[in-house]
Amino acid sequence: MMSDDIKLDRHDDARAILARNDRGGYTVPTDRLYPFQWNWDSAFVAMGFATFDIDRAYRELERLIEGQWEDGMIPHIVFHAPSDTYFPGADVWGTRHRIPTSGITQPPVFGMALRFIHDAAVAAGRQDALERTRPLFAAALRSHRWWMKARDPERRGLVAILHPWESGSDNSPAWDEALARVPTTTTTQIRRKDTGHVDAAMRPRDVDYQRFIHLVDTYRDCGWNPEKQWASAPFKVADVQMTGILARATADLIRLAAVLGAQDEVAELSEMHRLLTEGLGRRWRDSLRRFVSLDLVSGEDIEAPTQAGFIPLVAVTLDGQQRAAVAAEIARWCDGMVVSLPSTAPFSPAFEPKRYWRGPVWAVINWLMADGLRANAMNELAGSLERGTVWAIEQAGFCEYFDPTTGEGLGGNTFSWTAAAYLVLSRRVTDG
């Protein structure tokens, strides 16, 4: 499945990539292809920085919340500085905030990153750990309140995405049926820039982009009002990946709230965590050996086999039967792969090993997967994923993602979150 011949000699390269992509306290994912600050990218990057520069780790999150909305939402893009190499830019989103941002969000890794950085600061003996953490905790709490109010108004214990881009897994086969109902008409002229930087065979198809932009047009016409968006959304999915990350981040905020002496917030977050984990528990399917998302428009389970089905492990505790089922299912996905875990099961008709989120391996997904497996006492399998990820990076470089069938690096190069994943996961490999 993957090689154990790992040489931990690329730490300097990883740090150099973070320095290269630094734009003054915030980090772009990679030059030109993604020239702004992305939400969950920066959370992973901040954890990478925390392995060697705690001040810079805190600063990454501080710059991200400069774009936080008054209602608590942290947008998926903050346009700190102009660039003409990316579409859709700030002009398309038409948001009205002190800093231009997009109008949608991304997986709330922020709370996970904040605890990671705080713990690193405490371990380093930093006297300013509480001072730096406290305002970021407040921002994270506001974000989590927004999630529960805006994206789970019916209190299912599952938060919804209203655009595939919000999932982070933008082009996943999990969205195919729901996205097919979205019209292809747009009022915005589409000027794709991504295929000028990366082979079109690795990117979403034009018809998908038309639907993506139709959704942007729809929500912009709502004035980015959450209630109006919820009512008018032609794409509405209760996503187990998003919910799992939110639940895990909520658990991390509970820990921070206790450290900060915020007992009322501990109680509030604990209730939030209970609701989310119970919601996730109801999405387990014995027959599929994983969790499934829910299409809120059709009312149907989304059974497409993607990595999202395993991400709830970061937040829920499986019983022995479930752990055995997950191990068997992951082994099935990894069979014959040079690098694992593919983001779509290789036996799926939708599997494309080189196309964005339809098969490639992502270092940060393996990071989340390993965290979830370790939380469920599946340490051997977690270590295998971590070693394989480090090996892939050392063989192919700090690419955006990797072909699971060959190990080839794909997408953007000198990618920030891949560098961050290397810094964190290689340390785990070294520590055994």
Image: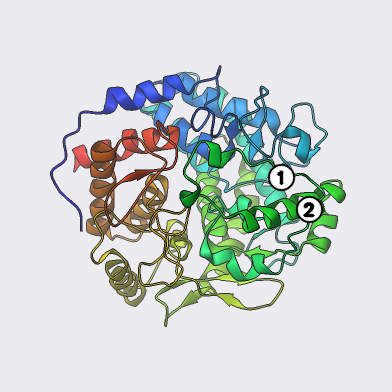
Residue 414 drawn at (x, y percent): 40, 30
Look at the picture and state if 90 lies above or below 359: above
- Give the residue at x 61% y 47%: 106
Query: What kind of element bears circle 2?
Result: loop
Residue 363 drawn at (x, y percent): 37, 45
Residue 193 drawn at (x, y percent): 60, 38
Question: Which amino acid is tagged 1?
Answer: Ile
- Give the residue at x 72% y 64%: 182
Residue highlighted by disc 2: 186
Left or right relative to 229: residue 41: left
Residue highlighted by disc 1: 190
Mark 2 touches mark 1? (CB < 8 Å) = yes
269 vs 429, nearest the viewer: 429
Give neighbour class at mark 1: few <14, some 14-19, many 20+ (Cα, 10 Å): some
Give neighbour class at mark 2: few <14, some 14-19, many 20+ (Cα, 10 Å): some
Residue 303 drawn at (x, y percent): 51, 75
265 vs 228, nearest the viewer: 228
Residue 154 falls in which quadrant of the image? bottom right
Q: Specify the label residue 146 is tagged with.
A: none
Please state, as top left, top right, bottom left or bottom right, where the C terminus lies in the image.
top left
Question: Which amino acid is tagged 2?
Answer: Thr
194 vs 169, nearest the viewer: 194
Residue 208 falls in which quadrant of the image? bottom right
